[in-house]
C-alpha cells in the first residue's frame, strides 16, 4: 500500500519562500501523476498543481501560477513544491495526492498534510 | 466562488437516503469524469467515487454516484452517524486546464 508523507511546512513572511516535499513509499511512483491540494483554515479543498509521472507535464491553479513550481525526482520517489512570493492567502494545509485510474482529478491516496502559515 | 457548485449543507436521519448534488459546465463535468471525496474533520480526504459512478474497493455500496449532462450526484443510502462529514466533487476542467473542486457539502446526521 502506498504511503505519502509531506514535509517542509512552516511559518514564512509574506514574500517569502518555502519548499514542500512529498516522499512516497510502498510503490514505485514514476508512472503516476502526483498533485498538491490545499485547504485553508475552515475552507474547502483547492487544487494547486499536478505533475505527470514522467515530470514532463505540469499544470497549476491560476492562484499560484508564476509563483509555485512543482517538480519530482523519481529516483528518490519524491515530489516537491517550491513556493515563492508567498501571500497570506497561501496559508493552508498542503496535501500531496496520487492519481487514481489515470485521471488527474482522481486522488486515490493522500498524505497527512503539512501546514504552511504565511504571516508577518 | 468554486467552479463546481454544491449546496453548503445537507442532513438526514439514520437509515435515510440523502443526495448531494454538484453542478458544473461543459468544460468540466460535461466532458470529464467526476470524482467524490469524503473528509472527516481534521483528516485527509478519502476517495469515494471515481469515473462518475464507480466505487474503489472498500467503499460500501451505500455510496453511489451518477452524472447527467453538466451535473453529478452522490447518494448515500442507509445513512449512518459515521457518514457525518464534508463531501466534495471534483473534475478536470478543459478550459482552466486544471482540477476544479466543489465548495463542499457538510452532511449532518440528525
Image (cartoon, coloured by chain):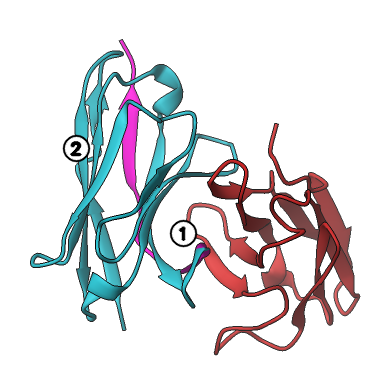
Please give the name of the residue rendered at 72% of the width and 61% of the height, measured from the top-left corner: B31
Residue wearing tag 2: A19
Locate residue A50, reporting x and y percent.
39, 52
Please give the name of the residue rendered at 27% of the width and 38% of the height, measured from the top-left corner: A69
- Is the C terminus of chain B in the top left, top right, bottom left or bottom right quadrant? bottom right
**Chain B's colour?**
red
Tell me the element at label 2: strand
Lateral position of residue A99 relative to residue B1, left or right:
left
Q: What stretch is highlighted in magenta?
A: A105-120
Above or below, A7 against B59 in this view is above
Q: Can residue A109 be seen in this view?
A: no
Q: Give the camera-side residue of A15 and A40.
A: A15
Above or below, A117 against A32 in this view is above
- Nearer the viewer's eye, disc 1 or disc 2? 2
**Chain A's colour?**
cyan
Check residue B33 for magenta coloring. Answer: no
Residue wearing tag 1: B44
Task: Determine which of the numbered discs, if any, sits on residue A15 in the image.
Answer: none
Q: Is residue A105 visible?
A: yes
Locate residue B64, reporting x and y percent.
77, 79
Amino acid at each position: 500500500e502506498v504511503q505519502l508523507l509531506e514535509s517542509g511546512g512552516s511559518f514564512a513572511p509574506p514574500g517569502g519562500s518555502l519548499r514542500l516535499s512529498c516522499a512516497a513509499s510502498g510503490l514505485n511512483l514514476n508512472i503516476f501523476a502526483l498533485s498538491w491540494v490545499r485547504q485553508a483554515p475552515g475552507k474547502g479543498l483547492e487544487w494547486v498543481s499536478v505533475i505527470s509521472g514522467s515530470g514532463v507535464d505540469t499544470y497549476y491553479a491560476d492562484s499560484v501560477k508564476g509563483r509555485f513550481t512543482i517538480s519530482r525526482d523519481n529516483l528518490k520517489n519524491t515530489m516537491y513544491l517550491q513556493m515563492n512570493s508567498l501571500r497570506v492567502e497561501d496559508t493552508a494545509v498542503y496535501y500531496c495526492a496520487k492519481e487514481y485510474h489515470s485521471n488527474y482529478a482522481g486522488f486515490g491516496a493522500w498524505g497527512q498534510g503539512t501546514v504552511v502559515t504565511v504571516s508577518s | 466562488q468554486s467552479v463546481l457548485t454544491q449546496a453548503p449543507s445537507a442532513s438526514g436521519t439514520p437509515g435515510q437516503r440523502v443526495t448531494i448534488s454538484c453542478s458544473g459546465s461543459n468544460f468540466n463535468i460535461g466532458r470529464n469524469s467526476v470524482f467524490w471525496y469524503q473528509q472527516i474533520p481534521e483528516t485527509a480526504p478519502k476517495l469515494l467515487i471515481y469515473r462518475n459512478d464507480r466505487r474503489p474497493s472498500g467503499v460500501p455500496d451505500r455510496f453511489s454516484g451518477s452524472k447527467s449532462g453538466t451535473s453529478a450526484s452522490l447518494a448515500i443510502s442507509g445513512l449512518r452517524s459515521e457518514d457525518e462529514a464534508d463531501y466534495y466533487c471534483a473534475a478536470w476542467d478543459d478550459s482552466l486546464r486544471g482540477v476544479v473542486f466543489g465548495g463542499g457539502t457538510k452532511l449532518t446526521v440528525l
